[in-house]
Image (cartoon, rainbow, N blue to C red):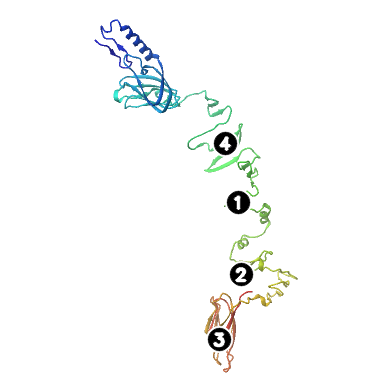
């Protein structure tokens, strides 16, 4: 009877009456195979991305080692095929390469051992559908997939990793800085509602949840919260007394720097100006009973409900004399509006230069005239037909009307009239002719 071989180890079983005179050599080889299967440590040099781990029949081979020490320089994730696929195999693996080593035997599951990690694996020898299983992943408190990740660790006395000690509710670092580097976000979730920042056991700052409002406060009494630029330049400070102190030239609104000094802004704190009065400066159309005179940079007046500014070039110098009860009684000599007198009754006399020499002069005729020009006009005329009664109505352009009869009862003469019409105003009546001139300011 010829020799046969064990399925999993390839040990030769000498047939009865076979190998006369040579069975000792076969037996010695079998003992070497058994030694390798039980405790053999084999260095497997990897290259490229694939190789085969073979268990040969009757001869020593790399698939017979119990412990596999992987080395070499694979060019990427390296796949190791366990052959034959009908042999049960148990391996202790140490991956000493810088690439992942993946063990496969058939179409079933594979096991990957990370670079620098180890694992205990077995192949079930199920033929074409054979699978490889990582036994270490099944052990309690064990290394999973050789990746250095533990499913759980129980250490009531604490755990020390390098110079980091984790014990109870505290993580201590004996020296140096601690960097927390994550691929995603860092989520600090404190069910107590407060996150504290301390130095040497002294709490400096805490962030607290107050009905979903966020409260940020310093804890050491008498100390401030300081905001600085990267170079240490102070920008703002929340002082212990509650003052929010912004450094000069560091305050802006919507990108526009606020250049007023604290002293300038504090002027408003001593003024008795009301909100309504301040609103007039913002374009409010409320009309007051007074004229507000500014300095030499301009004059602001109430003109029919509209705030207007007269350019500095038009501002003249006025001096008051003998003023009583707020009434200006005289105007100083100068150019433009000068030489006149403002009396207590409010009348004023002015030079001819008050009206522009570019004022238009025009003729009118017919039974009506409407001032459609941009300025008030002065109209002087007479009735077109002599004698009889000459009457007409006047409209100020906004609904105000009046009627007057200027006939003198003399049937032999024309009847004269004269009016000042505002813009939009009109006259109508008997047939008339006349001339007008715009009252355009000089």
Q: Seen in the image, is 109 located left or right of residue 309?
A: left
Q: Label 2 to label 4, Cα distance in Å?
A: 63 Å
**Can you tell which of label 3 and label 2 is closer to the viewer?**
3
Q: Is residue 338 above or below residue 207?
A: below
For label 2, the residue is: 303
Q: Which of marks 1 and 3 is nearer the N terminus?
A: 1
Q: Seen in the image, is 166 located left or right of residue 88?
A: right
Q: What element carries label 4?
A: strand
For label 4, the residue is: 196
The reply to whether callout 1 and callout 3 are in contact (CB within 8 Å) is no
The reply to whether callout 2 and callout 4 are in contact (CB within 8 Å) is no
Q: In which quarter of the image is the N terminus?
A: top left
For label 1, the residue is: 252
Q: What element carries label 2?
A: strand
Dot 3 alpha-carbon crowd within 10 angstroms: few under 14, some 14 to 19, many 20 or more: some
The reply to whether callout 1 and callout 4 are in contact (CB within 8 Å) is no
Label annotation for residue 280: none
The reply to whether callout 3 and callout 2 are in contact (CB within 8 Å) is no
Percent across and percent down for residue 374 are: 56, 74
Label tally: 4
Q: Quadrant of the C terminus?
A: bottom right
């Amino acid at each position: 009877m010829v020799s046969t071989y064990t399925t999993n180890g390839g040990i030769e079983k000498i047939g009865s009456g076979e190998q006369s005179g040579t069975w000792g050599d076969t037996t010695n080889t079998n003992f070497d195979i058994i030694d390798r299967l039980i405790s053999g440590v084999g260095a497997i040099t990897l290259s490229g991305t694939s190789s085969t781990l073979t268990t040969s029949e009757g001869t020593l081979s790399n698939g017979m080692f119990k412990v596999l020490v992987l080395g070499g320089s694979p060019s990427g994730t390296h796949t190791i095929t366990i052959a034959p696929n009908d042999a049960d195999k148990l391996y202790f693996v140490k991956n000493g390469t810088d690439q992942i080593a993946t063990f496969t035997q058939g179409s079933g599951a594979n096991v990957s051992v990370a670079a620098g990690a180890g694992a205990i694996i077995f192949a079930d020898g199920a033929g074409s559908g054979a699978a490889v299983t990582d036994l270490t992943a099944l052990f309690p408190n064990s290394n999973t997939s050789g990746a250095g990740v533990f499913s759980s660790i129980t250490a009531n006395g604490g755990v020390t990793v390098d110079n980091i000690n984790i014990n109870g509710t505290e993580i201590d670092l004996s020296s140096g800085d601690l960097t927390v580097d994550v691929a995603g976000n860092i989520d600090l979730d404190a069910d107590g509602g407060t996150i504290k920042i301390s130095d040497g056991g002294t709490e400096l700052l805490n962030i607290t949840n107050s009905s979903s409002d966020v409260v940020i406060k310093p804890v050491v009494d008498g100390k401030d919260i300081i905001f600085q630029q990267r170079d240490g330049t102070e920008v703002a400070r929340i002082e212990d007394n509650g003052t929010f102190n912004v450094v000069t030239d560091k305050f802006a609104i919507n990108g526009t720097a606020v250049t007023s000094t604290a002293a300038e802004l504090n002027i408003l704190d001593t003024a008795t100006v009301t909100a309504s009065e301040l609103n007039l400066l913002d374009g409010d159309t409320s009309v007051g009973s007074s004229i507000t005179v500014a300095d030499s940079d301009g004059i602001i007046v109430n003109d029919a409900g509209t705030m207007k500014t007269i350019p500095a070039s038009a501002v003249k110098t006025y001096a008051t004399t003998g003023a009583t009860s707020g009434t200006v009684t005289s105007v100083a000599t100068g150019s433009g509006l000068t030489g006149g007198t403002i009396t207590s009754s409010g009348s004023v006399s002015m030079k001819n230069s008050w009206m522009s020499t570019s004022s238009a002069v025009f003729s009118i005729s017919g039974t009506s005239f409407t001032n459609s020009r941009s300025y008030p006009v002065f109209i002087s005329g007479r009735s077109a037909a002599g004698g009889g009664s000459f009457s007409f109505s006047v409209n100020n352009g906004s609904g105000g009307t009046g009627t007057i009869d200027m006939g003198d009862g003399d049937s032999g003469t024309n009847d004269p009239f004269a009016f000042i019409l505002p813009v939009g105003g009109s006259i109508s009546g008997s047939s008339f002719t006349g001339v007008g001139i715009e009252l355009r300011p000089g």
